[in-house]
Amino acid sequence: MRGAPGPGVATGAIRIFDTTLRDGEQAPGAGLTVAEKLEVARQLAKLKVDVIEAGFPSASEGDFEAVRQIAEATKGIGVAALARCKEGDPQRAIDAIKVAERPHLHLFIATSDIHLTHKLRTTREAALAEAVKWVKYARERLGRDAEVEFSAEDASRTDHDYLLQVYAAVVEAGASTVNIPDTVGYAIPAEFGALTKRVVDLVGRDATVSVHCHNDLGLATANTLASVQAGARQVEVTINGLGERAGNASLEEVVMALRTRPGEFSSHNIGVQTEQLTAASRLVSYLTGFAVQPNKAIVGANAFAHESGIHQDGVLKNPLTYEIMTPQSVGLLGSSITIGKLSGRRGLQSKLAALGHDLTGEALDALYREAIALADVKKELTDADLLALVDKRAATGSAATIELLDWSIASSRGGGSSGRVEVRVNGAERGAESNGNGPVDALYAAIDRAVEKDLGWHPVLAEYEIRAVSEGEDAQGQVTARCRRSSDLNAEGHPNEGAPIVTGQGLSTNIIDASLVAYISAANKLAALASGAPSAPVEGSREAMK
Ligand code: KIV
Ligand code: ZN
């Protein structure tokens, strides 16, 4: 059979394939609950990416459920699921995406000798046969209109002649997209562009050629763009460059490069609403707990900040002197409306719309109440304060097992700390006291005591981080607490293999309160896991990639 290409890509267009929820989520500790993944998917839909890779259904029940729910809820764009070329995986992925308006199955198998010999313990011929077998299987089951993508894992370190043989065979078998992953971020731009051109020359008429670059040498964006210049028509990217190890090519960098330098790319048309980039970046950062470095291109806090007098003077005279794109084009600086305690709903709604969030009805009312309560303690709310409130609401997807009712603390320099908490656990009020070597430590220990009897475990802190979301003395503190369950640790206190780790966030002008909210939010996610409700994927499920 001569390829059965899927919908393909319009002339001059580049397909933006977002893999934040699959490769991005593979970043250690970035696990998201199903509710959080749906929230990110909604933002990606607003951003108007072309395809959302929603997960790897064979990795865990949670991943299957997340892909299925995103496939059901997302209209007008592709929903992809990853599967190995291995019995069971492709069918599981098909089951998860079959309800999608535009299903996109992503099959992969490693092709480099190093992976074939040491990881798969197989031969080039056997890997090629598996690839063809599963592409045919997928095409037969999904029909001619669905996208069937094939990735040759570690393509950049694969013998090129063999690699081309594999791509030709899978296109012949029905693959409509062939992806060239630089799995370990080994490639450099000229070389990767040349490889892409060979693939485009070979199969580019029958299939969409895609690239997927990792950032181990800091070259993921450069390699991606070199491939677009060589004829690639799909780019696989993540918000904030989140991903395995040093991450993936960053969506915002690739997209803004295409927008800012269209003359350098014969195909550069993208439908992305770049004004949603900042909102997407903040949401992903908030939910995963991975802060964006201040000097990160496009979405970092300093990306549009001018410090030196000469630069400030130039920008005031004409922004073009030092800005190659406007802050508004990436969704920064919504409008000049400021929000304080006398502001009305309409003002808040218009300010939020300018920041990329269209809220109406009960969602707007609830956010308005929170914003006015915050404005009671802070004179004026900044964009960062408002976005943090929106993120906080987005994150509260699952029903709470534990609620924080009250806390008090006595703490002195050199004298230790003793604290008391009142919580509600599954509807019953509990209180406990504890000492610690600081206020947060004492109160976390008190929470452990208060919840342990009812839950049979308590949260164990693995990482704690605090940062100010806005400026000034009355800035809100945002706390990230990454936790495991005590019942998932062995006798030495080390996590058992596959023990889930989740991220809780807390936001308040009082950093102790923010710390407790973050800890309880993580505990609630762990409780959802324990009750079998679909929640965060198990970190160790990355084992399944082997
Ligand atoms: O980096 C990689 O090779 C991947 C594939 C599964 C596409 O993520
Ligand atoms: Zn990858």
Image (spheres, helix red, strand yellow):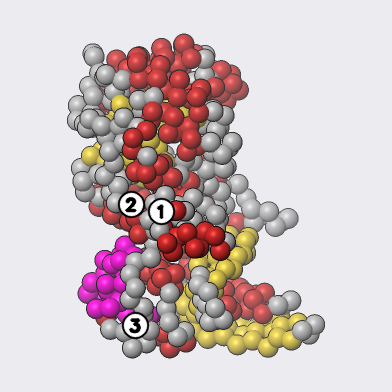
Residue at label 2?
A: 274
Q: Relative to residue 202, is residue 65 depicted above or below?
A: below
Could you say where residue 75 lies in the image, as x and y percent from the top left? 21, 48
Instruction: Give the label, 3 or 2, closer to the camera.
Output: 2
Q: Is residue 155 visible?
A: yes
Mark 3: which secondary structure? helix
Which of the 4 image quarters holds residue 440? bottom right
Q: Dot 1, how many residues are within 10 Å of its Cα: few (below 14), some (14-19), or many (20+)?
A: few
Question: Tag 1, which secondary structure?
Answer: helix
Closer to us: 17 or 222: 222
Q: Nearer the viewer, mark 1 or mark 3?
A: 1
Report the residue marked by disc 3: 369
Foreground residue among 100 and 7: 7
Label 3 Cα neighbours within 10 Å, binned few <14 / some 14-19 / many ≥20: few
Q: Is the CB atom of the residue marked by disc 1 within 8 angstroms of ligand 2's nearest atom?
A: no
Find residue 91 and report its image quarter: top left
- The residue under label 1 is 320
Q: Amino acid at mark 3?
A: Arg
Query: For the magenta stretch, what is the residue range?
Result: 346-371
